Amino acid sequence: MCTNGVNTGQFEQMIDQIDDHIKLERRWSHTLAHNAGDAGFTATSEKLHAVQALLDDVRAALDEAKEALEEDAEKANAVTVSLV
């Protein structure tokens, strides 16, 4: 559906694509953190686990963005334009 010139369905799909990409990067940082830890690279493992936590925050923010998109689209639907 288009709202105020924005295809909100497509917009939501693009947010989902970003989320899928971040999910993959999170999985890789998790795997690398454990590989580093198993090899005795404690500092590297800790940093990669921190990256993992930050990527969790990014995914949560993307969920919030999708919710905000839905709310904004609902509010925009209430707008009435009249030809004068």
Image (cartoon, rainbow, N blue to C red):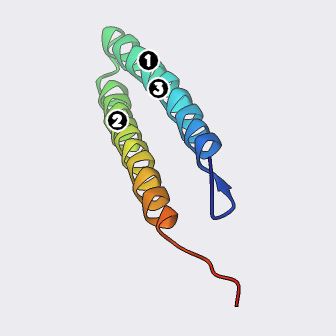
- Residue at screen point 53% across, 34% down: 16
Type of amino acid under label 2: Asp
Q: Dot 3 corresponds to which residue?
A: 23
Q: Which mark is residue 69?
A: none
Q: Which mark is residue 56?
A: 2
As drawn, 32 above or below 7: above
- Residue at screen point 61% across, 46% down: 11
Which label lies toward us, 1 or 2?
A: 2
Report helix, strand or loop for mark 1: helix
Q: Earlier along the polypeptide chain: callout 2 or callout 3?
A: 3
Q: Earlier along the polypeptide chain: callout 1 or callout 2?
A: 1
Q: Which mark is residue 32?
A: 1
- Relative to the observer, which residue lies in front, 49 or 68? 68
**Distance in Å between CA atoms under marks 1 and 2:** 16 Å
Which label lies toward us, 3 or 1?
A: 3
- The quarter in which the C terminus is drawn is bottom right
Q: Earlier along the polypeptide chain: callout 3 or callout 1?
A: 3
Q: Which corner quadrant of the image does residue 3 belong to?
A: bottom right
Q: Position of residue 39 (x, y in %)?
A: 36, 10
**Distance in Å between CA atoms under marks 2 and 3:** 8 Å
Q: Position of residue 5 (x, y in %)?
A: 69, 61
- Residue at screen point 43% across, 65% down: 75
Label 3 crowd bin: few (<14), some (14–19), many (20+), radius 10 Å: some
Report helix, strand or loop for mark 3: helix
